[in-house]
Amino acid sequence: MIRYVDKGLETTLQSFVDRSDISACRIACLLQSYGTGYGFADFYLQLDEEERPVSAAAKYYSDMTVMLTSDSDIDELGGFIEMTSPASVLLAGDVLKDRNNDALCQRLNARSCEECIIMKLRTIPEAYVDNDDMVSDPELRDIWELLHICDGDGIKAPSWEDFLLDMSHRLRHGTAMIRALVRENKPAGVAMTVALSERCALIGAVAVSPRYRRQGIGASCMRALCSALALAGTTDIYILRERDRNEDFYSSLGFEAAGKALIINRAD
């Protein structure tokens, strides 16, 4: 049974997603940022016969995140996803580690189905000593322009309006963090979270301007961000990478493989 989460189930959802998992982190971040009072942010729980949570989902506009467990009813979730018609779905959870997910992609009528690698930071870094070039509150327009420049190079930049509304809201609510290294009064590189909860963080945007690449700027931004997250109490720090990209970069920073996730695109 899949239940829509309103105020009466909000505490149950909060407790269920309080775990070290990238999908749980995304759902918890969205819940903390917006709560259940906005029409563009919807939350769901899948319950077993004894009404215990076994899966959770959040839909933000047309994008959905689904947290799976070993007790999830995949067939029911498939029908639910069909009914709610998200353009894209991110699924994560230990249940994906040892299964062939082709049938799941077919069940969801995926236009494309990408298997990505989850990596987790092994050891929280020592405190990073910020200098004048590393900033925590850059101009959001400058950050968006840098992401836009890097669009297609492992970065998918949203529209300026969507980026401004979401990022400024999450920064105000403590569910986002940015570190940018400045050169000539503009960000040369940036690392930022795409989800941040009380327990964990998912770093999802690491970009360096083409003119400043191969100077260690991306690594410096990552170290500064991870250190700041640790100082803020974050215990689990993750990244999600494409299967054949950036493994050496993240490994050199202390990340190691910690599972896999599926990104399903259902849009025409």
Image (cartoon, helix red, strand yellow):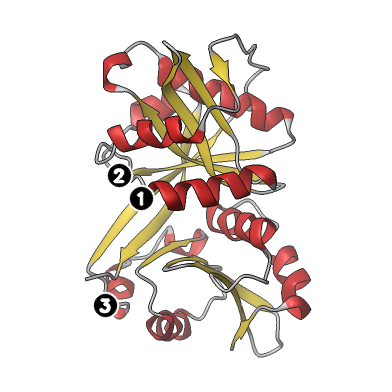
**Residue 80, horizontal then vertical, whole percent:** 45, 84
In the picture, the quarter occupied by the N terminus is bottom right
Q: Which amino acid does label 1 sit on?
A: Cys
**Residue 240, horizontal then vertical, whole percent:** 43, 44
Neighbour tally class for label 3: few under 14, some 14-19, many 20 plus, Cα within 10 Å: some
For residue 137, side relative to residue 110 (left or right): right
Which residue position holds label 2? 243
SS category of the residue bearing label 3? loop
Quarter of the image where one finds residue 229: top right
Is tag 2's residue or tag 3's residue first in the polypeptide sequence? 3
Q: What residue type is labelled 2?
A: Arg
Do we see residue 259 in this rendering? no
Mark 1 vs 2: CB contact within 8 A: yes
**Residue 183, horizontal then vertical, whole percent:** 43, 12
Relative height, residue 179 to residue 46 (above, below): above
Relative height, residue 68 to residue 259 (above, below): below
SS category of the residue bearing label 2? loop
Which residue position holds label 1? 116
Q: Which residue is drawn at 26% across and 36% down?
A: 153
Observer-nearest of 32 and 79: 32
Q: Residue at x 21, y 71 (%)?
A: 268
For residue 197, side relative to residue 159 (left or right): right
Observer-nearest of 183 and 204: 183
The image's mark for residue 109 is 3
